[in-house]
Image (spheres, rainbow, N blue to C red):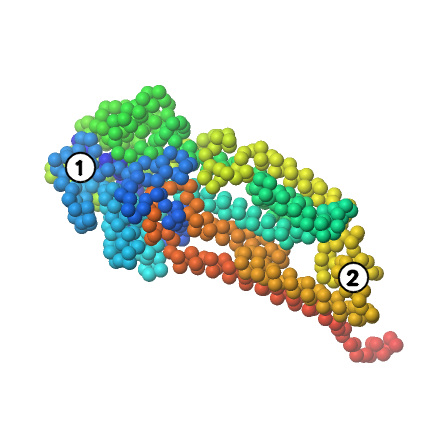
Amino acid sequence: MRIEERPSLRTPAPLRARFPRGTGRAGGPAAAGRILRRRLPLTAPALLLVYLALAAGGPAAASGVTATDPPDPAVAPLAGMAPGLPAPADHRPARGARAPDLEPPPDNRSDLPAWLAYRAHNHLDALPREARLFYRRGLMMRQSGSREEAVRLVRGASELDPWFVAPHLTLASWFLLREPSQALLHYAAVIEQARQNFLLQLALTGNALYLGLEALFLGLLGAAMIVVLLHQRELRHPWTERLSRFLSPASAGIWSWAFLALPYVAGFGAALPTAVFLALLWPVLRVRERVLFVALTGVLVAMPWSAGALDRFSVALREDGGPFHGVPLVGPEPWSPERAARFARLADARPDDPFVQFAAGWTARQGGALSAAESRFRRTLELWPGDDRVMNDLGNALAMQGRSGEALALYVRASQVNPANPAALFNASQIYTQRYDYRAATDALSRASALNFDLVKSYQSQTSDEGRLPLVDQWLAPRTFWAALSRLRERDPARALLPPTWRARIECSGRTFSALALLLAALALALGVWQHRVLPLRGCSSCGRVICRRCAVRQHVTALCPACAAVQARAESPEFARVLLLQHRRHVRGADHLVRTALATLIPGYGLLAFRRVVLPVLLLAAAAALAIAALGLGEPFRYEARLALPGQEVPAALVIGLWVVIYAISITGYFAEVARAEADEAAAEGPVRGRVRIPGRQTAAAA
């Protein structure tokens, strides 16, 4: 077999670069089976990441496509956070390909087998537009009730474009409860694609980070607001006592409620007033509740840096500046002379930027300018002397110019730098074959097949009529982009691109708000400690209501609230007073118990917080917030692919309901366990004290 000396009869190189075959294993359930067997311990957490980051948005997160709209093959933008991800490449051959050898496409766009045969006959990597068309029709068939036909069309869409993520997620959600093994295969295919694609990794990581930060913030905020609500008597009592000097007790109570609600409606958000109120309550809080205050204040202070972490992801996709100048978007894009000219100008202006140099070489290689591609790749290799993928691409440019000796040296060097690179071994085997060194060719091909059997099988199936095989090009590894992204300095938070749900929040307004939150929390903490020293609070000896030394009615060692003192005053004897106080306490606590039980049934974690538990309620509220965000379609600020306004793309309803049931079961079970424990302690305290009767023995008699 001879080396293909011009671009082969394949999909344009950018489409291959979306998941470059030389980077690892081909996608699809067939390859996913081997991946799943090798990486089964890593599958479960990865599935959770895929669910949270890609399957979080339901129909509410649609991209504006309705059932009557034409198919939209473009990939959705990152929900306003950054320039949109590029549309998938067309299935037309790259410049320089032998177009007359192409079989004409089918006339009927509804004939799925014909399109699959067309792709196989022409050795095309993918048909992205047709794949999205059949995927859309599959969702529509699912909506109409034709489940078998829907599965056939969606599965066909995944075969037409193996790198199309949405069909795999959709099939996995449909098979999750009926055929879990099939669901795992499709999830494994998505995970394998995520291993090889920087853009997909960026979307998954960004969405997971956003969802985690949002759920943690809402969990802490919800728990803190519940704690403030549970301790509102301790918070309002000093205000009421001071207002009672000028107002009637009823008016003072109303004004104390107004002071409590005013900061929430005055435009300060929900987190800042809650943190201030917790600081005022510091003397009466337990250690766990104080930790909650510290955590909430820390989150408020760290908000600008959290926003900067998400802004880092959006900056990576901008085409008008560093660090990449739009290079990550080149891989999935079809070749165009405008893009090639743009990167050629950028490469001339930025000779020390390896990303720009590589993109210029890549686009030149696509356009058939092999000499320009060689010079750009050589410059990239000078800047990245240990990058095996650049060595492989430079070797391809040399081999296509007939300089097989130099190309073979680069392939060998690339395989030495990275022995796990199958593309360099596969390309080297073709050079050996051209030189009739069949033993070396067989050895290189065997090693390449052991590393990535699907790659070798796929490229061997693309043998031309002249017996020539295409060379394997390789896009930049995701770790290269991540390494450069980690070295990027954070921008000013005022210029950061925030998710749409964060832009209107005062908590995300910048470092000024964080400094103000820290200052107010410190002042409120000092004020709360001083206030408690001046007017200490305690509970009524009978009903537990909040009292202070000004309103308490003291009797010997007990201090009663005015209501309990009035009840006791009606009794004619101490025994009868004790009975009346017990009845009054049961009445007061019974009403509180009914309200507490109702709220504990409705709000996850409320009942545990009522018994001053903190860690588990925060986790329950965070999990509930994550599910609510996903249900509302707000969990995807980064979208790798467009979502259609059709049902069938969401997480299975049974799974979502099951997660909600688990959250409420843990919350309610924990609450009633705390209630039973509290009732047992109260019964033990109210019961008579029984002492042991000691029978006199010999020692007692002798002592007597």
Mark 2 lies on residue:
565
At x 31%, y 53%, the residue is: 171
Give the mark toward the camera: 2 or 1: 2
In the rendered structure, the answer to whether residue 231 lies left or right of residue 639 reads right
Residue type highlighted by circle 1: Leu
Residue type highlighted by circle 2: Ala
The answer to whether residue 345 is visible is yes
At x 54%, y 60%, the residue is: 601
Which mark, by number, is residue 528? none
In the rendered structure, the answer to whether residue 462 lies left or right of residue 203 reads left
Dot 2 or dot 1, earlier in sequence: 1
The x and y percentages for residue 90 are 24, 37
Crowdedness of circle 1 by 10 Å Cα count: few (<14), some, many (20+)? many
149 w.r.t. 8: above or below: below
Please identify the quarter of the rendering in which residue 466 is found: top left
At x 59%, y 43%, the residue is: 265
Q: Nearer the viewer, residue 184 or 269?
A: 269
Q: Nearer the viewer, residue 73 or 283?
A: 73
In the rendered structure, the answer to whether residue 606 lies left or right of residue 402 reads right
Location of the C terminus (image quadrant): bottom right
- Cα separation, mark 2 vs mark 1, equals 95 Å
133 w.r.t. 698: above or below: above
In the rendered structure, the answer to whether residue 360 lies left or right of residue 43 reads left
Describe the element under mark 1 as helix, strand or loop.
loop
At x 74%, y 62%, the residue is: 542
The x and y percentages for residue 681 are 67, 66
Mark 1 lies on residue:
9
Q: Nearer the viewer, residue 266 or 704?
A: 266
Crowdedness of circle 2 by 10 Å Cα count: few (<14), some, many (20+)? some
The x and y percentages for residue 306 are 51, 38
Please identify the quarter of the rendering in which residue 400 is found: top left
